[in-house]
Amino acid sequence: MTAEAQADRVAAQASIPSWTLDGRQLGDLELILSGAFAPLRGFMTAADVESVEMARTLADGTPWPIAVTLELPADAIAADASQLVLADPEGTPLAVLTITERSAVLDRGAIQSETTGLIRLAGPVTANRVPEHGSFRRLMISPEQARAQLGDGPVLGFATRAPLGGRQIGQLRHLAEQLRARLLVLPLVAGTAEVVRQPEALIRAVLAATASLPQGTLVVPVPLAPREDGADRPGAGTGAGRSGAGTGTGRSGAGTGAGRSGAGTGAGRSGAGTGAGRSGAGTGAALPGTANADVSSARELAAAAIVAAAYGATHLIAEDWPHGGSTISSDAGQARGLPGALIPVLASGDWAFDPGAEVWRPLALIEPGTELEDLSADQLADMLDTGAPLPSWFAPEAVVAELRHARPPRSERGFVVFLTGLSGSGKSTIARDLRDLLAERGDRRVSLLDGDLVRTLLSAGLTFSRADRDLNIARIGYVAAEIARHGGIAICAPIAPYAAARDRVRKTVSEVGDFLLIHVATPVEVCEERDRKGLYAKARAGLIGQFTGISDPYEEPTDAVAVIDTSMLSREQACETIMELLTSGGWLSSS
């Protein structure tokens, strides 16, 4: 298309409503446009979605494992709109959706069918331009280009959200030799990468491993997003988790090391530990990231097989998948209970490190009792977080170097301390004192994002409506994440009354650093007694609307690492509690 024709097309689309795609939607669009999701030409209809959920086929009977849908708020597009421009986060119009169907998205968790406020749009998409990638653009070739580079003959594919260690390298070399196949490694870069978190770090780690793989191995990053409920999984967690592991003092005021629902200083979302994600996941876990071959992981694996086949793979190796064959005589995926896989899926088998031979090999070939099991994701994340040395047998030195670069020890990386609580709870006082203590130490640069200060600068002009409150917290989260990205400490002290908004900040920060939520749980009666500005009195008199704790709700956190009641603790004790948390968790040195 000429530049003039492109300009004409953009001008013609100026009157069409636009939607900015999130990470998953952006990845789906790219896979549709590139042909990696063939035969899909757009986003699925309700009939296709229902058929996929019930029978793992499209409505026409074509095997297909996952729903590929476009969902957006119902008020984001007029009811009579027939087209929608699909834009990337920078506003670049990538494609146009011709809307053939729209339907309400129902809340499956509700007892009765209730809408979620979202609509699902279906229809074919027409490309405006080839998506422009950021880092490693040279590697993100099209399926057609990949097939041309791989040529004829068998190709063994491996799709992964995690770095490759010695075990995965050994398994890939072994099966490639059996098949006499080229190797195609597909880092899955939509969503959070296991252990290393960032997609660029995952690609670097995979490239480091290729020096130990057969010559001619092709690495192609692809944006296949995880399909689990809750969108992107966090993989290996980086801060305090949803289980409520904590170190702060609760309302009883007894002690300084008891959290509301358990002990720990940096547990990941699964509870115990120091920030690792799903327990037992191998460091190169393909797709599911767990050893449970459940329905969700089977669907993800089948989707990976479809994408791998589009890029030229004739076979796919899958870790922790018991239904594949372990040799080249394996049946095709569908015959092994994996509808829609298109190509044979081979199980990697049980492998361990043989210290006698100093190689990774099948467990059956190792003298019983002498084998060394691979590190789990929990173990690897913990060792990286604490700076402990990794076993020499775990991975090649080049891979280990990339892992340490991507996930430095907690004592060297940025983090966010996010204090939330009612007006007058003492969070601003604690935040200021904490900033002063950390600045005195000089470990890292410290920035304070206090609620009142942010309101006068970063969020000037916003009201106290639910939407504007959420936007205010999103802005604070964005700035805090950038501080953490560059190794600094951000201390935030907004009211942040809504759990969903706090969760979004957690997700944003956890992609680049660590997030520690502190609940300053001072009772509202005490906050009202302290009210120097008279805000509570004005709220009770009806002079101030939407006042948190009086006329607007405060959703108490269930995922805080520390719970502090300043009616029971002095400001010095409150700060000491947080400093102990940071020290015991490894973010600060004990000296």
Image (cartoon, rainbow, N blue to C red):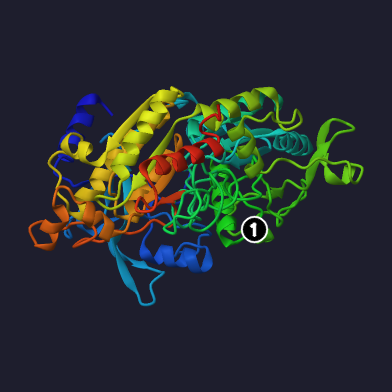
Q: Relative to residue 149, is residue 167 depicted above or below?
A: below
Determine whether, in the image, residue 452 is placed left or right of residue 577. Answer: left
Q: Relative to residue 451, is residue 49 depicted above or below?
A: below
Image coords of residue 314 (percent x, y): 64, 42
Determine whether, in the image, residue 578 is placed left or right of residue 339. Answer: left
Q: Relative to residue 207, is residue 100 depicted above or below?
A: below
Task: Please give the residue where the numbered disc 1 appears in the rendered image.
Answer: 293
Task: Identify the residue shown where x is 68% and y is 60%.
Answer: 335
Using the rendered image of the protein, determine whether residue 27 is visible from the camera's viewpoint.
no
Q: Amino acid at mark 1?
A: Ala
Task: Identify the residue shown where x is 53% and y is 29%.
Answer: 411
Total labels drawn: 1
Image coords of residue 237 (percent x, y): 52, 44
In front of the other: 587 or 2:
587
Q: Secondary structure at mark 1?
A: loop
Image coords of residue 86 (percent x, y): 28, 44
Using the rendered image of the protein, determine whether residue 78 is visible from the camera's viewpoint.
yes
Quadrant for residue 34, please give it: top left
Determine whether, in the image, residue 467 is placed left or right of residue 447. Answer: left
In front of the other: 397 or 389:
389
Looking at this view, name the residue that lies furthest to the bottom: 112
Task: Identify the residue shown where x is 86% and y is 33%.
Answer: 355
Image coords of residue 46 (percent x, y): 37, 65
Q: Quadrant of the C terminus?
A: top right
